[in-house]
Amino acid sequence: MVKIRIKWWVAVILAGKLMSTGSMVYAEYLDRIVAVVEDDVILDSELYREVAAITEKLKASKTMMPPAYVVRRQVLERLIIDKLQRLVAEKSGIRVTDEMLRGSVTDIARQNGMNLQQFRAELEKQGMSYDSFVESVRNEIIINQLRGREIGSRIKVTDREIDHYLETQGQAGADKIKYRLGHILIAVPEGASATKIQKARAKAEAIIKDLRAGADFKRRAISVSAGGQALKGGDLGWRTIGQIPTLFVDYVKDLRAGDVSEPIRSPSGFHIIKLLEAKGLSDDVHIITQTRARHILIKTDELTNDAEAKRRLLDIKERIANGESFETLAKSNSDDTVTALKGGDLGWVEPRALVPPFEKAMKALAINEISEPVQTQFGWHIIQVLDRKEKDNSEEFKRNQIKEEIRKRKIEEETELWLRRLRDEAYVEIHMDAM
């Protein structure tokens, strides 16, 4: 790598300002340089501000303070590393738009329970410069994007590594499993006729069908159950297998979280149970809701602006309401060439599989309902939810958690090596008199 040492006069200009008197031009010294990093510099004022901020944090956490020169040296080294990363990011073309930056700062404010104006006032109340804070956020975003490109994209975790983790670090045993059950009772009077019994069974089966299609269990229990916990949404609470009514035990063992049983006959009527949750020492069951949906996409271009795309979709939606087939209209109108051939069908999709605006609109729909036009980066859509179901993906969830743990460890290790290499190969000159 070619080492380029910064010219002394450039450093002076960067550290001060040019003054002119008649025909003479000279530099008035305003700040001093503490380090030269490639073709950039770190000023004493930068170092001072960062040292002051770090010192305040250490004092606030009641950490025993090291000598001042140690703090100053450590902070300077961090500034050098940050500067090197910013330089690499700049050469790589990484930029943070004002919109992205504003969104990030707004999110931080929201996480602290404030709007942007309140957050800014709070920062200033604590003696912090809002502009400096925004710049630090920009720096963090840039560095995260750079590390994602340079390191994160290269990190792979294999199934073999996950299996090895489970074998060597997985928990050996588990406590008794606890089950949280929902319960609905469709009562049958003692000595009821065969007709009444059949009517009660049919009612229970209809309720089960609705529940499996996504109906709210608690609401249904409150409205139709004759059980003692009906006003609590049928929630029987957490119970071990020994605390569950014997009548239900064999059914519970075969249920996965989110499953609804077949009608269970007893002298009091027909019972419906739903396994709301199950937990043990080793793992909690993890349930996700899968949605089967279809859509029609209209892309925008030079000929079709946003208003025209929305108008076309509203027209299509009205035609569907008047009896035309969604599938047929998707085939002839949708700009999603992959799903158009299937009548717009997206199949069963899991949470976070689709872009956020689409998923948010989809989640708000009832089964068979069609949305208003929804905008994403792909264009404008109308969406119809065809069905929903719950899926126990505990095993997949556990493996994904382990995968993420391994990935984070690898990224941490690779980042340390990468930064060390970046520092070693760079031209850095520290002015010792500034220390």
Image: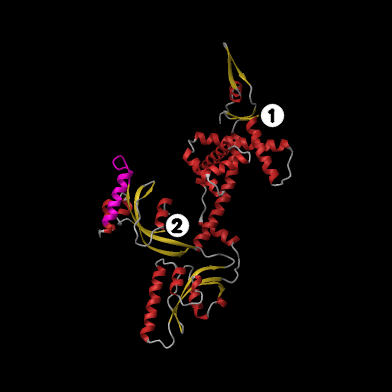
State which quadrant residue 283 falls in.
Answer: bottom right
Question: Is 344 positioned to the left or the right of 281 in the image?
Answer: left
Q: Position of residue 22 (x, y in %)?
A: 57, 11
On the rendered image, what quadrant is the C terminus found in? top right
Question: Is residue 313 found inside the magenta-colored segment of the image?
Answer: yes
What label does residue 14 carry, if any?
none
Give the camera-side residue of 186 and 253.
Answer: 186
Q: Is residue 330 visible?
A: no
Q: Which residue is mark 2?
A: 351
Asked which secondary structure carries label 1, the reply is: helix
Which residue appears at 60% of the width and 41% of the height? 123
**Image location (x, y in percent) of residue 192:** 40, 86
Question: Label 1 amino acid?
Answer: Ala
Task: Specify the color scheme.
Answer: secondary structure
The x, y position of residue 134, in whole percent, is 55, 39
Magenta residues?
299-319
Is 432 in front, or is 115?
Answer: 115
What secondary structure do most residues of the magenta stretch adopt? helix
**Up-down: is 43 above or below 74?**
above
Mark 2 belongs to which amino acid? Pro
- Say which element carries label 2: loop
The x and y percentages for residue 174 are: 59, 68
Instruction: Determine which quarter of the picture holds residue 44.
Output: top right
Query: Which residue appears at 42% of the width and 61% of the height?
Result: 290
Classify 373 as above or below 22: below
Tell me the residue at 45%/68% (across/down): 219
